[in-house]
Amino acid sequence: MLFQKLIWAALTTAVVVGSLQTGVQRWQAAPLILAAEVYEDQKAEVSPPGAALTAHAHGEGQAGPAHDHGAAEEWAPENGVERTGWTWVANILHAFSMALLVFAAMGFWFSRQDTSCLTASASLRVAGLVAAAGWVSFHLWPTLGLHAEVPGMQAGPLQARQIWWTLAVGCAAGACAIAAFVRSPWRWLAVAALLVLPYVVGAPKPRGDALAGFGPEAHASLEQLGHQFILATTWVALSFWLCMGLVGGLAFQRWVAPGVRAALSGTNTPPRAP
Amino acid sequence: MPDLTSETHRPSYTHEPARTVLRPLLAAAALGLVVLYGVGFAESPLAHNAAHDVRHITVKPCH
């Protein structure tokens, strides 16, 4: 059954990619978050009430658990093994969601080909192309408008940013799909229109200084951490999609391709030209 | 009244482009989006705190 094969292949890919990512993040990005949280707690102590309505509104400014929003009794993992463990779980779930989307796109691509095209090298090649589209759609395009932020930075309203992020990702993914699947010479016009749309709408920005409320020293440190974090998240995203292309391509060939081949040959459907 | 159970009246799949492939692919993509929402966007404080670092590092709007 193809669906089961998709789930198992995505789970296997997710465990490998998610675990590798946790390691890369511990090395590249997590220390920057921890460093920023030291200053974030300082802000909670010095800022006047209501000064950071849309910012990182930490509980009562206590420095106990790793991360603690809103009410003091909210659970948050303790720094160290517990926090890394939950990050590992979240990384696996994140990689699982991306692997499912990658395999769905790859399966759709191969469903339009002759089944004899489903070779190991073709799986890796298509996985690489889909991973590149994933990087453009889920990292490059949304982050050009909404930069990576360390904790403590003030940003635009959360819901507006989530809507804009969804718009940017949807438009970029749609543009990649049109470039891959539509053969009309007008497709590049549609691709350009979709790519431009989120930037015509405009990403929600914070009003004023994103680091308002911090003292000069904390302000300068957080600014530097913010720049380092943008660079770190760029490397992390590149490594994520590189791993996803490699591991996903192998997993697709091992588990999903036989299912696609069997399902296609069971449907009398003549192979269509790309 | 045609006998719909006979072999001759069974629907032909020739004109249905690989429906048996597209359906599980769509289901997988839908599940992927649901899991992505849970990891990246769910408002529950538990989900937020557990996935906090991943949300920041994967550049999801977090706070």
Image (cartoon, helix red, strand yellow):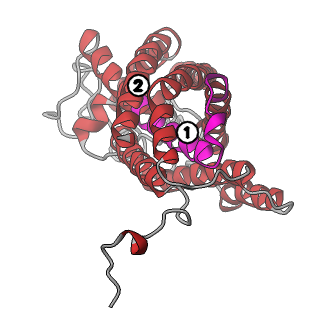
Q: Are marks 1 and 2 on the same chain?
A: yes
* Element at label 1: loop
Q: Is residue A217 above or below residue B31?
A: above
Q: Is residue A96 above or below residue A27?
A: below
Q: Can residue A207 be seen in the rendering of this structure?
A: no
Position of residue A11 in the picture relative to residue B22 (left or right)? left
Label 1, on which residue?
A210
Position of residue A124 in the picture relative to residue A256 (left or right)? right
Using a 10 Å C-alpha cutoff, classify the residue at mark 1 as few (fewer than 14 neighbours), some (14 to 19) or many (20 or more).
some
Disc 2 chain ID: A
Amino acid carrying mark 2 in the image: Ala
Q: Position of residue A36 (x, y in %)?
A: 45, 21
Name the image quarter holding the N terminus of chain B.
Answer: bottom left
Q: Position of residue A87 (x, y in %)?
A: 34, 22
Q: Quadrant of the rendered structure where residue A115 is?
A: top right
Disc 1 chain ID: A
Q: Residue at x 40, y 75 (%)?
A: B9
Q: Quadrant of the rendered structure where residue A8 is?
A: top left
Q: Nearer the viewer, residue A78 or B42?
A: B42
Q: Can residue B19 be seen in the rendering of this structure?
A: yes
Q: Residue at x 63, y 25 (%)?
A: A124
User: Which mark, by number, is residue A14?
Assistant: 2
User: Which mark, by number, is residue A185?
Assistant: none
Q: Position of residue B51 (x, y in %)?
A: 34, 30
Prevailing secondary structure of the magenta residues = helix
**Residue range corresponding to the magenta coloring:** A95-122
Q: How many marks?
A: 2
